[in-house]
Amino acid sequence: MKKILVASDTHGRNENLKNVILKNRPIDKFIFCGDGEGLEKIIREMIGDECELYMVRGNNDYFSQLPWDIEFELGGLKAFLTHGHMYGVSVSEGRILEEARSRGCGICFYGHTHRPVEEKKEGIFVINPGSLSFPRQMNRKPSYMIIEEEDNGKLHFHQAYVER
């Protein structure tokens, strides 16, 4: 069983992320959906060399050289990772779902809204871990996602929250 940590929108405030990484070790893969504001410079120290890393830049990552979006495989499915702002996710998931579908992806990871989402829409798993620094959902708890990948590729999604 592999453990995957998904996080987003730390905006340079990385204390909750450090604590989440320590709490969930060992982590096999780390997926970051953007707006780390410098996180790419220190993340390897936080997660270790043995952890696979997938990161994109967000609308507040002004000096980042990270890509705007990437594709990779997870659980036998093609995954699309982007921050989401260029697809209007604050208004609707329509454009980002269309993009994921056009790329042949079965999973779509995004951030930007600071609100967690974990659902299957039109045959695509749609995942937003929320924000570890500035949550905007009703309970205002910093959030992230843990995915467990079985040896046969089956994925189990678990929304998680940082207790204050």
Image: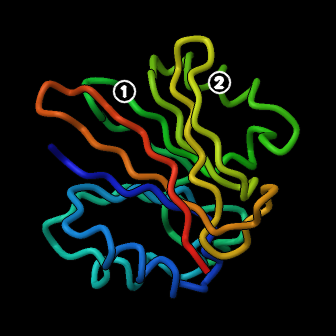
Q: Quadrant of the N terminus?
A: top left
The residue that disc 1 covers is 78
**Which one is nearer the viewer's eye here, 15 or 94?**
15
Q: Residue at x 42, y 39 (%)?
A: 157
Q: Residue at x 28, y 74 (%)?
A: 47
The secondary element bearing badge 1 is classed as strand
Label 2 packing within 10 angstroms: few (<14), some (14-19), many (20+):
many
What's the coloring here?
rainbow
Residue 110 pos. (x, y %): 60, 46
Q: Quadrant of the C terminus?
A: bottom right
Q: Is residue 82 visible?
A: yes
Q: Amino acid at mark 2?
A: Leu
Q: Residue furthest right?
A: 91
Q: Residue at x 20, y 57 (%)?
A: 28
Q: Amino acid at mark 1?
A: Lys
CB within 8 Å, label 1 to label 2: no
Q: Is residue 35 visible?
A: no
The secondary element bearing badge 2 is classed as helix
The residue that disc 2 covers is 97
**Which one is nearer the viewer's eye here, 154 or 75?**
154
Mark 1 and mark 2 lie on one chain; the one further toward the N terminus is 1
Is 16 drawn above or below residue 120 in the view shown?
Answer: below
Instruction: Determine the CA span between mark 1 and mark 2.
Output: 13 Å
Q: Quadrant of residue 136?
A: bottom right
Label 1 packing within 10 angstroms: few (<14), some (14-19), many (20+):
some
**Which one is nearer the viewer's eye here, 22 or 79?**
22
Is 156 drawn above or below residue 62 in the view shown?
Answer: above
Residue 155 pos. (x, y %): 32, 32
Residue 6 pos. (x, y %): 44, 55
Q: Quadrant of residue 57?
A: bottom right
